[in-house]
């Protein structure tokens, strides 16, 4: 058993426990606060779940460090070090959660020496637990996952997101990307409203491509290792080496498809997640 399997198993048990907190709040009225834009929301449940996760993990592993979406939003410095680090999105798909659109997930990744050791994406409403540990495969509720291996881009289903950005450059870039893909043509373009659940569809083989510009490391860190362990590829949207802090990701069924998609999609400028800024944590 890898030395990190105990951490993975503990993370899975916490996802199930805090998943119940999310589900019990899912049908309730929610108090919503805005963050970086009118479409970037946070609720008391996001904050409560992140505190529960960090408190439980810290008690069990006091030397470990954290990168949490809502801790960073509250001003905590985002710094990925060589220490064992839990990268947490307590509710990925908060807009979905607020609207009761049934795709919300807890996303937990774990790194050591800045390398992903495992990832957990727990899609709470449909009780789908996606897991992967480095070198040991990817699983959905315990069943092995394999990417589609598709190499013909014209036979691909592509998943992406229209994130929280509402400025003209981001919106023109996002919409022109989708138009170029449809003109390839790809079979279809989909968006579920949660980067983590979007991205693991490549690991399931139900989608062949996922790309996103503007998301954060906590949205996609866990799904990255799940796709990789399912035989998919993960890179930057321009085809270069993936950088978890860049706020750009392209995951695909094969390197051939990834390179073809990288030829047609464009990125808009985003401040890196780990870029030092005075004041704001987002
Ligand atoms: C969300 C992502 C989604 C993106 C949203 C937001 P959150 O994460 O999962 O893909 O479109 O803008 O970033 O904020 O719900 O954790």
Image (cartoon, rainbow, N blue to C red):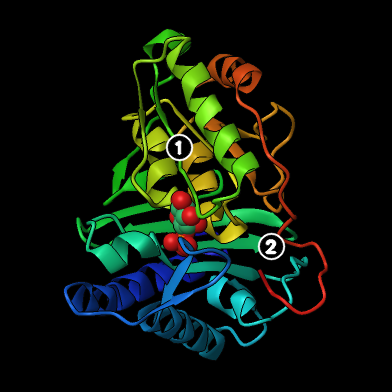
Q: Residue beneath label 1, please? A: 160
Residue 52 visible somewhere in the drawing: yes
Q: Viewed as shown, does residue 142 lie left or right of 135?
A: left
- Distance between mark 1 and mark 2 Cα atoms: 28 Å
Front residue of 228/24: it is 24
Where disc 2 sits, the SS reads strand
Q: Where's residue 56, x and y in %?
A: 46, 86
Q: Is residue 94 above or below residue 221?
A: below
Question: Which residue shows up at 43% across the image and 58% down it?
Answer: 120
Question: CB of mark 1 within 8 Å of CB of mark 2?
Answer: no
Question: Which residue shows up at 65% across the image and 40% down it?
Answer: 169
Question: Which residue shows up at 65% across the image and 17% down it?
Answer: 263
Residue 105 visible somewhere in the drawing: no
Q: Viewed as shown, does residue 152 lie left or right of 71?
A: left
**Residue 112 circle label:** 2
Residue 172, located in which quarter of the rendered image?
top right
Q: Quadrant of the C terminus?
A: bottom right
């Amino acid at each position: 058993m890898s030395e990190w399997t105990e951490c993975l198993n503990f993370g899975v048990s916490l996802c199930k426990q805090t998943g119940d907190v999310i589900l019990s709040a899912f049908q309730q009225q929610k108090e919503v606060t805005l963050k970086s834009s009118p479409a970037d929301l946070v609720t008391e449940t996001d904050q409560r779940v992140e505190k529960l996760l960090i408190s439980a993990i810290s008690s069990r592993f006091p030397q470990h460090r954290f990168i949490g979406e809502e801790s960073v939003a509250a001003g905590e410095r985002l710094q990925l070090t060589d220490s064992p680090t839990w990268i947490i999105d307590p509710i990925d798909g908060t807009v979905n959660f607020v609207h009761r659109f049934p795709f919300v997930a807890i996303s937990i990744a774990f790194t050591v020496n800045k390398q992903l050791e495992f990832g957990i994406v727990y899609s709470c409403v449909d009780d789908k637990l996606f897991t992967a540990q480095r070198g040991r495969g990817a699983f959905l509720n315990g069943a092995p996952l394999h990417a589609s291996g598709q190499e013909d881009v014209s036979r691909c289903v592509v998943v992406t997101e229209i994130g929280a950005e509402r400025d003209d450059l981001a919106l023109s870039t996002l919409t022109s990307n989708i138009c170029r893909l449809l003109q390839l043509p790809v079979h279809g373009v989909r968006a579920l409203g949660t980067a983590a659940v979007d991205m693991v569809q490549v690991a399931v083989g139900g989608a062949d491509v996922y790309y996103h510009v503007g998301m954060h490391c906590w949205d996609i860190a866990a799904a990255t290792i799940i796709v990789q362990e399912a035989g998919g590829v993960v890179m930057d949207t321009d085809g270069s080496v993936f950088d978890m802090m860049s706020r750009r990701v392209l995951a695909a069924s094969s390197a051939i498809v990834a390179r073809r998609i990288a030829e047609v999609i464009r990125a808009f400028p985003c401040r890196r997640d780990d870029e030092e800024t005075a004041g704001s944590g987002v």
